Structure formats: C-alpha cells, structure tokens
Image (cartoon, helix red, strand yellow):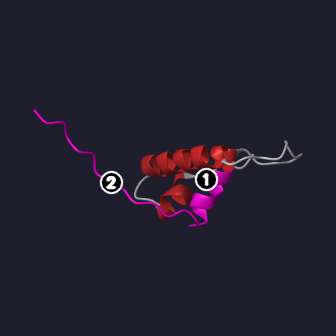
C-alpha cells in the first residue's frame, strides 16, 4: 500500500483537506464506471484517485457555496 504524504497531495491543490476531498469525489466518479470483474492486483479506487491527483492528471475548480436567503 502506498502512503501519500501531505506534501505530495498539496502539490496540485491548495491544502491537504481540499486535495483529499477532490480525490474522494474523483473516486466516486471512478466507481460509476463499469468494471469487468475484479482483476488480481487491481488498485483500490481511492488509491487510483490519489495517484492521479499527485501526478496532476485531475483538473478541478472550487465553486463557492451560495448562502441561504435569510
């Protein structure tokens, strides 16, 4: 199992919390794709997402939340 350091994941994101959120959402997207059986040695989706984030292959943008009308 590969260990990702905070310096690795923050290289392509503002901070470590945002990078983990981006990787988690990307892992959910990967989970929606059909997979053909479980291959031996296949990486987990979260590991794949973190690898792609640290390699700079994920593009994202932060959309500010709209506040509820009072």
| Position above or below: 56 against 50 | below
Q: Nearer the viewer, residue 5 or 59?
A: 59
Residue at 58% from the left image edge and 66% from the top image edge: 57
Residue 30, horizontal then vertical, whole percent: 64, 49
* Magenta-drawn stretch contains 19: no
* Magenta-drawn stretch contains 61: yes
| Position above or below: 7 against 31 | below
Viewer-nearest of discs 1 and 2:
2
Residue at 36% from the left image edge and 56% from the top image edge: 62
Residue at 62% from the left image edge and 60% from the top image edge: 52
Q: Nearer the viewer, residue 18 or 11?
A: 18
Q: Which residue is mark 1?
A: 50
Q: Nearer the viewer, residue 46 or 28?
A: 28
Which of the 4 image quarters holds residue 61? bottom left
What's drawn in magenta, residue-wise? 48-70
Q: Nearer the viewer, residue 26 or 53?
A: 26
Can you say which quadrant of the picture contains the N terminus? Answer: top right
Rendered image: mark on residue 59:
none
Can you say which quadrant of the picture contains the C terminus? Answer: top left
Residue 17, horizontal then vertical, whole percent: 44, 46
């Amino acid at each position: 199992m590969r260990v990702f350091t905070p310096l690795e994941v923050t290289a392509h994101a503002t901070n470590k919390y945002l990078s983990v959120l981006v990787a988690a959402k990307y892992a959910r997207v990967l989970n929606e794709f059909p997979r053909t059986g479980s291959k031996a040695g296949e990486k987990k989706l979260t590991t794949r997402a973190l690898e792609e984030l640290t390699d700079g292959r994920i593009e994202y943008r932060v959309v500010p939340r709209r506040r509820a009308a009072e």
